[in-house]
Each structure stands twice: as structure tokens, then as C-alpha cells.
Image: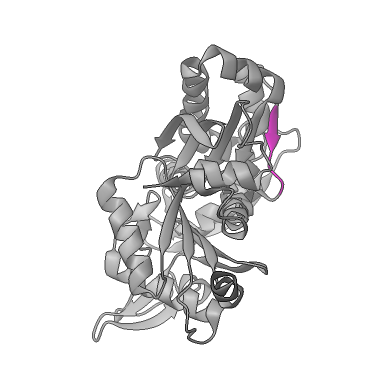
Amino acid sequence: MFGRILRFFAKDLAMDLGTANTLIYLRGHGIVLNEPSVVAINQEDYRVVAVGRAAREMMGKHGKRIVIIRPLKDGVIADFEVTSIMIKSFLSSVLKRKHFIKPKLVIAVPTGITSVEKRAVIEAAEQAGAGSVMLIEEPMAAAIGAGLPVDRPVGSMIVDIGGGTTEVAIISLFAIAYSESVRVAGDEANEAILRYIQKKHQMIISEILAEQIKIQAGSAIPMGNPVKIQLTGKEILTGIPKTFTITDDEVREALQEPVNIIVESVKRALEKTPPDLAADIYERGIWLAGGGALLKGLDELIHRETTLNVYIANDPLTAIVRGAGAVIEDMEYYRPVFIS
């Protein structure tokens, strides 16, 4: 009885600690935070100037005293201290005030995470004020968020394309039968566009603008309606701002390498899947989650390369945190999915 009373008052949380964005799910309330994983620091006194969306808006527009830090790289902590500051800020904005009972926190992490990286995630969350911290692999959380039957003896294939990593996994009976994590995803796609524009147009643009180009004109296959975007960048030779035009064909060419790496990881997973699970996947198809799932034509390209049906999860950007949220809502049922 006392345990049930404590659980009633506890503010248990689930977190998708992503390279690009951090999302938080509050038990009983749903998703309560979705912010960029960015922190602005004053270099002179190491004071935090801004966190999340406010910090991202400062990128490329700040003075010499301010440094903008993205503390996660390829899905794992690259700057421990800044990550702890960021998590603490996000938890404070969600919880509003201190509670007698420290919240339980479920955090989704990449499948390829090392024991050192696991410890860094847990310590950062504990320093930020979390009580017990439990980890769940991102593809498992994405599969739960997509509504796949992870508890049943049938194979489900999920491809989670985030900011720093692409996670491909075959799941059955609360366990991952096969998984692969490639460090090519949304960030690498942005960088590919930056490199292409520098080489082809001799222009420099910001990473934020590259992401906007990817969203507006990016696709994995020709989509029928030509797209042209007029941009302003800085000419490499003169440093003078100039306008230029880029087409969807050019963006698709720029994205070809990262897209091919993702498709090859899917095909590799299918090759290594046991026959019985492969038969289930043939019937049930492949599911895409994460922001990269929104790249136009990617589902069709994977279908062409594998001949399997490909589906995009409902609201793929939030699939991981919704899956982790389902776990925090019924921890006893989902206990087998936690990783040590």
C-alpha cells in the first residue's frame, strides 16, 4: 500500500536523449518537452546562457564570448558536464519544483552504446536529480512506440533514423534478435548537403539552413514535382554574401551516400535474420521511425531494394519517447526490455 502511495506522488519520466532533440514523457501526462539538445555557454565564467530552443536560435548569431555546444554526438554523450547541465535544465522545466521523491527515469540509448557510455548517461541523469535510472535500447522503444507486438513470438523489424545514428533491429519476445547501429543519420545528411554546396556552388551555408534544405527539397528518389530553392550564402573565394539556387536533383545527389548506407544496413540485417523471423518480416513488413523516416521517398526506395512492404510509424519523431513512456506507465510488464 505504501509503495502504491509513493508511486502515486512520484513524477516518473521517460527520456529520448537524442543527438538533435531531447524529448521527455511524464507518466500520466504524455510528452511534456521537446527541445533541441543544445546549450549556450558564456566562456568567460562558464555560465549557462540558454538551453534548448533558445540556444539553437543563437547558433551562428552569437558573439565571441558565447559558445554553442551540442553535448551529444552520434547518440552518446560527448561532453559529460554540459549534458548534465542540459538534462537538469529540462527536468527542472518539467517538474517545476523539487519533490520529496526523486523521479524514476527511463532513458533510450543506442544499441551500440559501450559500458562507459552507459555509465556516463546514468551519472549525468543522477547528477541532474533523477532517482533510479533505467536504460532501454532505442529500437526497442521505437518499436513499442510504433505499436509493434514486441511481447509476442513474432519478428518485427524497426529502422530508427535519428540525428546521430540509424538503428536497425529485429525484435521478438521482448528481446532484440539482431541489431546494428550505424553512425549515419540526420546530422550526416545535413553535412553531406553542406559539402555538396561548398564543392558544387563554392558557397558556405549554415547547418541549420542545410537541414531546412533537406526538409524542403530532400528525397531518396525523384518525386515528380521539381523543386528549386533560392538561398543566400557566403562565397568561399570572396567571403561576400550571394544568392544561388539549388534543385531537388542536386539535394538528392548530395544525400545519395548517407541514404545508401542506411539502405545497405537494412539489407544486411535481413541477410543475418534467422529464417523463421525473416518469414514474419516478409508478412509484417519493415517499420521506419525517427526524423529520418520523413525523408521523402525513403520508404519507397527501401521497398524497391528489398521487395518488402515498408511502413512509417505514426508521428515517427516521437516514436522513441512514446515507447519509453509506455514502459514507464507499466514498468512491471516491460521489465524484460531494460538493459543492464
Relative to 9, say whether 110 is above or below.
Answer: above
Q: Which residues are magenta?
A: 310-314
Our reading of the magenta stretch's main secondary structure is strand
Q: Nearer the viewer, residue 216 or 280?
A: 280
**Colour convention:** one colour
> How far across and down, in percent of the image, does residue 72 sit?
37, 58
Q: Is residue 253 above or below residue 134?
A: above
**Point 29% across, 56% down: residue:** 119
- Which image quarter holds the N terminus? bottom right
Residue 17 visible within the image: no
Q: Position of residue 25 (x, y in %)?
A: 59, 64
Q: Which residue is depicted at the point 47% across and 35% down? A: 258
Image position, residue 263 (x, y; %): 52, 27
Q: Residue furthest right?
A: 225
Q: Is residue 94 magenta?
A: no
Residue furthest toward the front? 1
In the visual, does 105 lie left or right of 64?
right
Residue at the limit of the structure toward the top, as seen here: 275
Q: Position of residue 92 (x, y in %)?
A: 48, 80
Total numbered labels: 0
Front one among 120 and 334 = 334
Residue in the foreground of this view, choosing between 97 and 11: 11
